Amino acid sequence: MDLGLKGKVVLVTAATGGLGLAIAREFAAEGASVVLCGRTQEKIDSCVDSIRKSTGGAVEGARADLSNAGEIDAMVAGAEARHGHIDVLINNSGGPRTKPFTDLSDQDWLDAFDVKFLPQIRCARAVFPGMVKRRSGRIITIIGTHGRTPHAYAFTAGIVNAALLNLTKTLAEVGAPDNVLVNAINPGWMDTERMAYVLGRLMQDAGLSEEEARKRILVDTQLGRPGKPEDVAAAAAFLASSRASFITGAFLDIDGGLTRTI
């Protein structure tokens, strides 16, 4: 099925590992011109080389620290100067640290917003004017299920994610008159470094074995297993495609049945 992504300029942030890397690879395989953003030049170069070899697609690296608004603005301006515009932003960022509630300090809460919420605000803000000017664009925010399905061991992630869900709905309303479509993907437990981190914290804090910790976090996932980054990548490609031209302000849960809200 042709998704109509050939030649589209796609900026993927936090793309040197996990979900971001899988998404960048998917778009390159679909024929898009991918701008792969990361913080460490060595990792960026390695990922660009890997994607070129595996897909033969057009991909370039762009370095920016998502905690620095100036670096984001410069990175976006550079991509727009090289390509003329950005068609799609995959608004991805790292996840906050997790601890038992009473161990979370004020600084932990502030750090949670600094590591995930504000970077996605900055990236959306940087690409939005160009999309509005062209009256065309897609912003796909990678959030997570805990924004709508709270979990006692994911306080910070859940609350930051809820804020990003609100951002998605609100920005979709702002962008609609200019055909800027804004949607979110909510991954459940994925076989990534993030899941390994949460398992490690749970093993440490609750004194569980790896198998026990794994069973605990997957107990509500109806398929009984974590997903793969490629599952999220396929969903992102669909939402960016011509097949999704009447979808905005939507949340797509890629979670193996974890989210049971109506």
Image (spheres, helix red, strand yellow):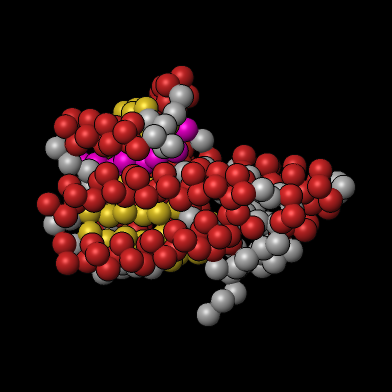
In the image, residue 187 above or below residue 32: below
Residue 176 placement (x, y as % from top left) = 22, 66
Residue 104 picture location, percent across and down: 68, 50
Q: Would residue 179 be seen by someone viewing this image from the given angle? A: yes
Question: Is 259 in the magenta?
Answer: no
The quarter of the image holding the N terminus is bottom left
Quarter of the image holding residue 245? bottom left
Point out the stretch of residues depicted in magenta. 5-16
Q: Is residue 114 left or right of residue 120?
A: right
134 vs 100, nearest the viewer? 100
Query: Magenta: predominant secondary structure element?
Result: loop
Residue at the top extreme, as displayed: 42
Q: Residue at x 59, y 50 (%)?
A: 109
8 inside magenta stretch: yes
Left or right placement of residue 260 versus residue 225 in this view: left
Please provide percent x and percent y for residue 147: 54, 63
Question: What residue is rendered at 17% in x and 47% in y?
Answer: 130
- Classify 139 as above or below 246: above
What residue is drawn where x is 68% and y is 42%? 196
- Residue 207 appears left or right of 174: right
